[in-house]
Image: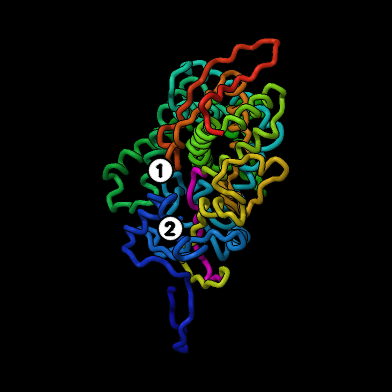
């Protein structure tokens, strides 16, 4: 246990126990090898333990649902977003960088685009992009689906969020993937005194190019009342005092939405393909449901994939008050708190038989947002969560409507850390056949040799 002495000289327990190995070794365990390292640490130290990490310093890792709930409900005056975070590369106007009242004001303006009739308009865009991408899929030949899913989600976000088309669409489609990948790698690295030193020089050059494209998109924006994209809504939005959002803040927010929703959604879809191919019974029922026009099982599959294969490992917070009581522990100012999504999602006390892929656990109940947390929680829960689930629903529906996904008896794909997301190592390998529609009912799922 980590202890400190009070003014009276008494020793008080502050933080839970943890390893004493060098911070670089602990960093490899908790960040580079989260699936293996975090489980070993919990077996040794329990639901809460203290680690020391490069950049972040001393941090408490928790996975107890009661403590997770406390973290999500704690006031932002006491517990705020962890530093450093993606705000360093996404810009000072992004939700990642904002705190307190400024964060609430910006978040309030970003909520309307992701609800109501707007989602219906976005769904058609996603279905169109999915059908266009799937037209290039090979038949009876193994291939990874993740690159396809990346293209689908990127194109959908560029159209639904950025309202991009023509030259700006093409330029953003070329620029943004490497830009976001580079930014994610730089987000937690020290900023050099000379910010023009490579790779920061390359990053800033790409950022200037992005801002130039956004300036052209904004200058061309007209008929805003007839548009459903997020950019159009933000250009029309107003704070309570009647002032509009600054264009620089809009640029930052759209970049943050892309970063939060592009690769993570595509990776979850790759995991969905990987899981369904190894569970032919569920795949069979899912196709029957698609043909019948249903969606309950498909929605449950999406929830279960996010539970058993969360693409983001940690949710980070930082103590802003002088101290904070978290369960039996006392945290001091600037102590970091890391919620382990994987440990929570694999807790048998929370999800019975947690290592089994069982979408049925979500058929008759909605997930508890303090136990099922792929989108984070509290005031910083991902603002695009509803959009992401709708997007995955539309992609899976279109894929299963148009293609037979062949089951397999191959071993599970291993986890691969891509920096931003935990992806299937082989990219979610699929073998498909284009479906031939007929009036006679048929079962389009091949299960020969597959695991039950």
Image position of 367 with respect to 137: above or below: below
Secondary structure at badge 2 equals helix
Is disc 1 surrounded by few (<14), some (14 to 19) or many (20+) residues within 10 Å? Answer: some
Whole-percent x and y of residue 218? 53, 31
The disc, 2 or 1, on the residue closer to the chain's N-terminal end is 2
77 inside magenta stretch? no
Residue occupied by mark 2:
40
- Image quadrant of residue 349? bottom right
Q: Quadrant of the C terminus?
A: top right
Residue occupied by mark 1:
417
Whole-percent x and y of residue 406? 53, 23
Is disc 2 surrounded by few (<14), some (14 to 19) or many (20+) residues within 10 Å? Answer: some
Q: Nearer the viewer, mark 2 or mark 1?
A: 2
Secondary structure at badge 1 equals strand
Structural distance between the alpha carbons of marks 2 and 1: 18 Å
Whole-percent x and y of residue 226? 67, 25
In this picture, which residue range is highlighted in magenta?
A: 310-325
Q: Nearer the viewer, residue 198 or 417?
A: 417
Whole-percent x and y of residue 89? 42, 45
Q: Residue at x 34, y 37 (%)?
A: 205
- Image quadrant of residue 426? top left
């Amino acid at each position: 246990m980590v202890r400190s002495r009070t003014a009276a000289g008494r020793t008080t327990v502050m933080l839970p126990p943890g390893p004493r190995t060098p911070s670089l070794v602990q960093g490899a365990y908790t960040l580079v090898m989260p699936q293996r390292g975090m489980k070993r640490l919990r077996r040794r130290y329990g639901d809460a333990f203290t680690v020391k990490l490069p950049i972040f310093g001393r941090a408490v890792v928790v996975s107890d649902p009661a403590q997770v709930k406390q973290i999500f409900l704690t006031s932002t005056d006491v517990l705020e977003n962890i530093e450093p975070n993606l705000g360093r590369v996404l810009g000072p106007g992004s939700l990642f960088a904002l705190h307190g009242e400024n964060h609430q004001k910006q978040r309030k303006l970003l909520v309307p685009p992701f609800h109501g009739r707007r989602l219906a308009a976005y769904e058609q865009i996603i279905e169109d992009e999915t059908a266009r991408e799937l037209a290039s899929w090979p038949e009876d030949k193994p291939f990874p689906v993740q690159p396809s899913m990346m293209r689908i989600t990127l194109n959908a976000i560029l159209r639904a969020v950025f309202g991009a088309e023509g030259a700006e669409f093409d330029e953003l489609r070329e620029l943004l993937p490497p830009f976001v990948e580079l930014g994610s790698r730089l987000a937690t690295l020290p900023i050099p005194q000379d910010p023009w030193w490579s790779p920061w020089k390359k990053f800033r050059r790409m950022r200037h190019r992005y801002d130039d494209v956004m300036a052209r998109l904004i200058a061309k924006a007209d008929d805003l009342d007839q548009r459903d994209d997020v950019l159009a809504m933000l250009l029309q939005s107003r704070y309570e005092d009647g002032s509009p959002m600054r264009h620089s803040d809009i640029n930052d927010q759209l970049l943050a939405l892309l970063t939060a929703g592009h690769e993570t959604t595509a990776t979850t879809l790759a995991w969905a393909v990987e899981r369904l191919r190894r569970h032919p019974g569920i795949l069979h029922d899912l196709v029957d449901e698609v043909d019948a026009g249903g969606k309950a099982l498909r929605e449950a599959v999406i929830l279960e994939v996010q539970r058993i294969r969360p693409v983001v490992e940690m949710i980070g917070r930082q103590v802003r008050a002088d101290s904070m009581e978290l369960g039996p522990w006392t945290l001091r100012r600037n102590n970091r708190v890391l919620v382990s999504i994987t440990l929570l999602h694999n807790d048998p006390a929370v999800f019975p038989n947690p290592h089994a892929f069982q979408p049925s656990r979500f058929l008759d109940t909605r997930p508890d947002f303090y136990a099922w947390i792929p989108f984070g929680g509290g005031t910083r829960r991902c603002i695009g969560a509803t959009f992401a689930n709708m997007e995955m629903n539309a992609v899976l529906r279109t894929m299963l409507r148009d293609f037979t996904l062949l089951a397999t008896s191959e071993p599970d794909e291993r986890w691969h850390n891509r920096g931003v997301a935990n992806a299937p190592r082989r990219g979610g390998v699929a073998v498909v056949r284009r479906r031939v529609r007929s009036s006679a009912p048929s079962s389009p799922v091949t299960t020969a040799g597959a695991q039950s």
